[in-house]
Image (spheres, grey):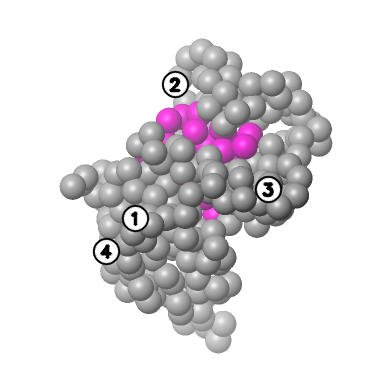
Amino acid sequence: MNQPVLQAQNLSKIYNPGSSGEVQALRDVSLEIRKGEFLCLMGASGSGKSTLMNILGCLDKPTSGRLLLDGLEVAGLDDEALAKIRNRKLGFVFQMFNLLPRTSALENVELPLIYSDRTEIATLARRALDEVGLTDRIHHHPGELSGGQQQRVAIARALVNDPEILFADEPTGNLDSVSSYEIIALFQNLNAKGRTVVLVTHEPDIAEHAARIVRIADGTIADDSVNPSPRKADQALRELLAKGEKR
């Protein structure tokens, strides 16, 4: 069995501690993520799933607990050190795409490379866009792309530094059904090639595409189970198109 690439040990997160507005978003959460897994963090709005993703992805720090990435304790590192880890080891995809509107798809994907020591930036960005099926759209601006295509650009940008873990926070939240299945199929294909994927969603029909589903409720892990038969997104897409849905 693959070794854990990420280990969370007794993580808690409290916002506004000691005040009348104190909120405990996470309560003593422990979780291991192994290399090559496709894991879904699922829960209702306010359950703590996005807070957990932000801590696992070194975007936020826990109030208490430990976080180990490749065996290295990272929870206590300063912001500069965490930024370097994110740039080298982690990739992020969000619901809102977060693309620069006046910048081409290629230039959007190149952005993370500017802060790295990688060379041949344009070549790497083109390769990432090819991996998500957008070779013919590299010079288009976000306003010239569909929602699904914009999300593909965002995924390419997340992939361009070859991260160990790809985090996706509600990546289908702004997409129609056809585009949603296309994006999930892309994540499944990336995972089949060995990419570790952590998907955050509140939608059970999206979660069922993952091989492992961790249900979050009230800041704790309510259930952590293997999905023996993950739904194939490309098959779901074919069924949807057969019913007359348009791309």
Q: Which residue in the protein does label 3 denote?
A: 242
Kindly identify the residue that appears in the image at 54 percent across and 47 percent down.
Answer: 235
Q: Which residue is mark 4?
A: 9
Quarter of the image with the C terminus is top right
Left or right, 244 with respect to 8, comes to: right
Distance in Å between CA atoms under marks 3 and 1: 48 Å
Question: What span is colored magenta in the figure?
Answer: 152-169
Q: Find residue 118 and report its image quarter.
A: top left
The numbered mark at residue 117 is: 2
Amino acid tagged 1: Ala
The correct choice, above or below, for 6 with respect to 87 in the image is below
Furthest residue toward left:
1
Which disc, if any, is residue 75? Answer: 1
Q: CA distance from mark 2 to mark 1?
A: 24 Å
- In percent of the image, x 50 and y 70: which residue is there? 43
Q: CA distance from mark 3 to mark 4?
A: 46 Å
Between circles 3 and 4, the one closer to the viewer is 3
Counting other residues with Cα less than 10 Å from the Cα at mark 3, is it few (<14), some (14-19), or many (20 or more)? few
Q: Of callouts 2 and 1, which one flags the residue occurring earlier in the amino acid sequence?
A: 1
Determine the secondary structure under disc 2: loop
